[in-house]
Image (cartoon, helix red, strand yellow):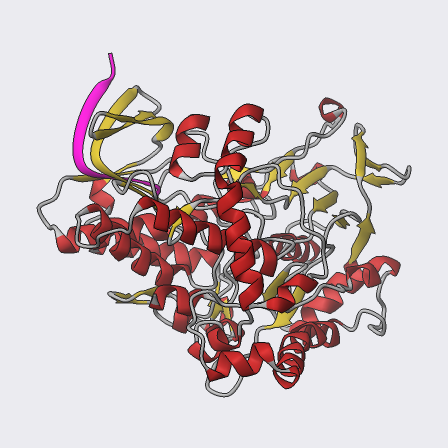
């Protein structure tokens, strides 16, 4: 028989968002009975010690990182670059924060959530540990598992034929790869990294400079996707030490074209309704890609291997049609290593051999270890498909009847929203990419946080944004205020109209990444100001 426990609030996930939600709730209600459920062995989530690996650094500079009630200390020079820092320093910061704010003692670790459902007026969470199962009941529930929990693993043909390890980025830290404790290190002489994201670039560089074992490093990027990411030099402008600091300013928010959280004024009219403003916007955003290309020297770098040029990106910075990230290394050192020590391939995997990755065009890449930088599914398997649909979570087209029912429900709302979006920003007609057919319905959360159907549950960390700490605090305050009735929500019809408007804007503005409805590249400040 399962143990049963009851709480005022249950928080699922002890990463940045979960810690902030729990800390904020306790600061408002010190006597509250709350519990944080964490699948890992310690706090931190993505930034936990067990998920840290060599070469994993923070994307943001220290000056815009950390919670308001515990400033983050400047990292030592040998473990930082332009104030970005080694992930283990972030782990330590979050561990200290959890202890200082009384959150750690309220955590149940290695607690894997199996299912969640509403049972009367309470949320019922089924959790399994190494020893037993436990039923948790909570008056309110905050889901803070974010977007980096469910690994996306391609369905490789003949996977069983491959004799080496296949390790997804979620498990790079626990695998011991590129450390002195790496299992079977002597046989891992040919490393292949699949993916074109920032994580892929980081691990490729780490593999190429590994001091523990010399290896052949291959970087494989699909030729049907957006290609490799554009890495922008981390150096900021003026008083801004790191480029990500600029993304937290109101001036950058104001320059974000088509920002639904900014009011209409003369500035927005100038930028978005005049040809001079349009030219200015193109210049500002195209300069990002120009800076990244100039730093890499794809066509002129001395000693570059033949495939290096295939890393050159032709993505639109303004429309975000490819991956972008900050290069938290000295650019010359980074690009010399990649150019001279990494074999770059563009292609699709056909099958796996005993010790090879075989591409569809017949090329073979000798591989002892296959590292997957293939990202994460935006999925929430702890909820039933019907519950997910009711709460505004993505629903897969594998559930055909439910998928079509959801599309039918939102069809008129989306159509009306599209007319409003295109009337406000006519140039969104001119997307450089066709609208992608989505395998899932988008997120349908009011203010990216609250289901229109039930304010007793909130989802934090859904927007893809530049500063998780800032958004975590604002979302936590908002979610708790809604749950406790201090914020009165509009009627459901009005909430659904707003949800459709934001999802449609997302899909139109970000044709490559906006389908799930949660892209927020430069709108963060305006969003949290709202």
* Magenta-drawn segment: 1-13
Q: Does residue 474 lie above or below 399 as drawn?
A: below
Q: Quadrant of residue 73?
A: bottom left
Q: Is residue 2 magenta?
A: yes
54 relative to 347 in the view: left or right: left
Quadrant where the image shows the N terminus: top left
Q: Return the residue nearer the eye: 2 or 445.
A: 445
Residue at point 48% right, 84% down? 266
Q: Position of residue 107 (x, y in %)?
A: 26, 40
Q: Return the residue nearer the eye: 269 or 437.
A: 269
Quadrant where the image shows the C terminus: bottom left
Q: Is residue 44 in view from this perspective?
A: no
54 relative to 191 in the view: left or right: left
Residue at point 65% right, 54% down? 512
Q: Position of residue 288 (x, y in %)?
A: 65, 74
Considering every residue shown, the one lying at the far bottom of the view is: 238
Q: Is residue 221 in view from this perspective?
A: yes
Q: Return the residue nearer the eye: 499 or 149.
A: 499
Total numbered labels placed on residues in the image: 0
Considering every residue shown, the one lying at the far right of the view is: 362
Q: Quadrant of residue 35?
A: top left
């Amino acid at each position: 028989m399962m143990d049963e426990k009851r709480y005022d609030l249950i928080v699922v996930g002890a990463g940045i968002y979960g810690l902030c939600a729990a800390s904020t709730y306790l600061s408002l209600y010190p006597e509250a009975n709350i519990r944080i459920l964490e699948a890992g062995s310690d706090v931190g989530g993505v930034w936990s010690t067990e998920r840290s690996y060599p070469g994993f650094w923070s994307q943001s500079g220290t000056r815009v990182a950390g919670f308001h009630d515990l400033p983050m200390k400047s990292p030592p020079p040998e473990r930082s670059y332009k104030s970005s820092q080694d992930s283990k320093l972030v782990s330590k910061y979050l561990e200290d924060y959890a202890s200082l704010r009384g959150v750690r003692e309220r955590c149940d670790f290695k607690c894997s959530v199996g299912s969640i459902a509403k049972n009367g007026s309470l949320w019922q969470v089924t959790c399994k540990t190494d020893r037993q199962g436990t039923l948790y009941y909570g008056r309110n529930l905050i889901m803070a598992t974010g977007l980096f929990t469910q690994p996306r693993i391609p369905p490789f043909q003949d996977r069983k034929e491959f004799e080496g390890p296949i390790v997804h980025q979620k498990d790079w830290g626990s695998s011991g790869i590129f450390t002195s404790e790496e299992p079977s290190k002597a046989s891992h002489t040919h490393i292949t990294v699949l993916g074109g994201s920032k994580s892929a670039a980081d691990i490729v560089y780490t593999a190429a400079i590994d001091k523990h074992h010399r290896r052949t490093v291959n970087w494989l990027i699909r030729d049907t996707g957006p290609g490799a990411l554009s890495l922008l030099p981390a150096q900021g402008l003026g008083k801004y030490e790191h480029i990500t600091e600029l993304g937290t300013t109101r001036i950058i928010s104001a320059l974000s074209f088509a920002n639904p959280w900014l009011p209409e004024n003369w500035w927005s009219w100038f930028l978005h309704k005049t040809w001079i403003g349009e030219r200015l916007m193109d210049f500002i955003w195209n300069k990002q890609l120009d800076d990244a290309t100039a730093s890499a020297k794809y066509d002129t770098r001395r000693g570059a291997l033949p495939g290096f040029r295939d890393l050159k990106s032709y993505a639109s910075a303004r429309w975000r049609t490819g991956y972008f990230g900050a290069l938290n290394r000295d650019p010359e050192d980074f690009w010399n290593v990649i150019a001279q020590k990494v074999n770059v391939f563009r292609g699709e995997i056909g099958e796996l051999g005993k010790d090879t990755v075989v591409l569809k065009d017949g090329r073979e890449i000798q591989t002892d270890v296959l590292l997957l930088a293939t990202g994460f599914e935006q999925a929430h398997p702890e909820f039933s498909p019907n519950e997910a649909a009711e709460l505004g979570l993505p629903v897969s087209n594998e559930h055909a009847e439910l998928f079509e029912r959801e599309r039918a429900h939102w069809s008129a709302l989306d159509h009306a929203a599209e007319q409003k979006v295109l009337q406000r920003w006519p140039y969104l007609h001119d997307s450089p990419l066709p609208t992608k057919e989505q395998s899932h319905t988008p997120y349908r959360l009011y203010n990216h946080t609250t289901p229109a159907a039930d304010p007793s549950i909130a989802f934090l960390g859904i927007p893809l944004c530049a500063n998780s700490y800032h958004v975590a605090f604002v979302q936590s305050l908002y979610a708790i205020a809604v749950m406790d009735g201090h914020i009165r929500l509009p009627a459901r019809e009005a909430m659904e109209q707003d949800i459709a408007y934001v999802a449609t804007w997302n899909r139109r503005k970000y044709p490559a990444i906006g389908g799930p409805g949660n892209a927020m590249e430069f709108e963060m400040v305006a969003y949290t100001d709202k």
